[in-house]
Amino acid sequence: MKKKILICGAGGFIGGHLASKFRQDDNIELICADIKPLEYWFQNFDNVKNFSLDLKDFDNTLKVTDGVDYVFNFACNMGGMGFIENNKAECMLSVLINVNLLRAARENLCKKYFFSSSACVYNADKQKETFVEGLKETDAYPAEPEDGYGWEKLFSERMCRHFTEDFNLETRVVRYHNIYGPLGTFDGGREKAPAALCRKIINAKNNKHKSIDVWGDGEQTRSFLYIDDCIKGTLDVFNSNSSDVFNVGSEEQVSINQMIQIIEDIADYPIKKNYLLNKPKGVRGRSSDNSYITKKIGWKSEHSLKEGLTKTYNWIEKQIIQGTNIDKFCRGNIEK
């Protein structure tokens, strides 16, 4: 009998990549759900059942989980730092998605539930300097997460834990650290730093501009995980016997200025930087400590930042040159 798997947020970046992988398995019956109209999904497939609906509505979550064995929840209202800094209430309303999906999964007797959390749950006191030590899973407490988006993710993690403890619903949770790669948004206000900087340098090169705008002083540090490593880590955690929360990230920490240098080398186009110090910058430094997931499950990231950025740059450059999917990958409002 085929396994029936539901991906919520399947029209987005990580969900779309996971759907692409699952549809290659003849033993899986795939159901995909997203709030966006189907024509704006980053990836969609004819041989799966697709739902375009609002998962903040409990009746909709009951509908999509009916008869499902496994639920993957990637659905949320989010974007890069500019978006989450200026849309805290909208980000926090995503808690309704997770609450209602957990309730529906329990009512419809789903076997296992996966929740995609974020490094934004981590205590801000541990992220005040550049090139900080990698964050361990225990560093989320005492709680002081990113305002808005981080609180929603941390609360939803606790909901998963208590549905396991109280109702025996098997759950899995990972904290993603800055996932990037092809087939994701690269303009419109929701894009993250790797895609935004690739786009800016591509456009500068194409238009023979000598500089790009950079938010902050460029010295803030992050680690970035390529999408293929993310999908592998997701499935390794999901298929494990552990209900612990795990980091899924890279330990290769770089400054924004260093990442720009890598993209300059890929583009073979040197660029000057205009630093916009009044723009949202987030925490000063953040990186993943993968020691626990490596010890417990055996997962580790495989792509270097330069390898992943090269693939991402080439894909974005192709989209800009062709111009055929700009509306799909550059929409600021994902709900209309």
Image (spheres, grey):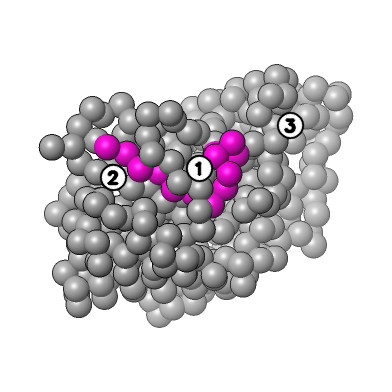
Return the disc, 2 or 1, that comes first in the chain's sequence: 2
Disc ID at residue 201:
3
Task: State which quadrant residue 82 falls in.
Answer: bottom right
Q: Mark 1 highlights which residue?
A: 11
Residue occupying the far bottom of the picture: 142
Q: In this view, does 277 lie above or below 179?
A: below
Decide if residue 26 is in sight here.
Answer: yes
Q: Is residue 40 magenta?
A: yes
Task: State which quadrant residue 207 falls in.
Answer: top right
Q: What percent of the width, then of the height, locates residue 224? A: 50, 44
The magenta-colored residue range is: 29-41
Q: Is residue 166 above or below residue 95?
A: below
The residue that appears at 50% across and 53% down in the rendered structure is 53
Decide if residue 292 is in sight here.
Answer: no
> How far apart, in angstroms, are the residues tagged by discs 2 and 3?
39 Å
- The residue carrying pointer 1 sits among few (fewer than 14), some (14 to 19) or many (20 or more) residues within 10 Å by Cα, namely many
Q: Report the amino acid beneath label 3.
A: Ile
Q: Mark 2 highlights which residue?
A: 5
Q: What percent of the width, then of the height, locates residue 95? A: 47, 69
* Helix, strand or loop status at disc 2: strand
* Helix, strand or loop status at disc 3: helix
> How far apart, in angstroms, are the residues tagged by discs 3 and 1?
27 Å
Task: State which quadrant residue 280 falls in.
Answer: bottom right
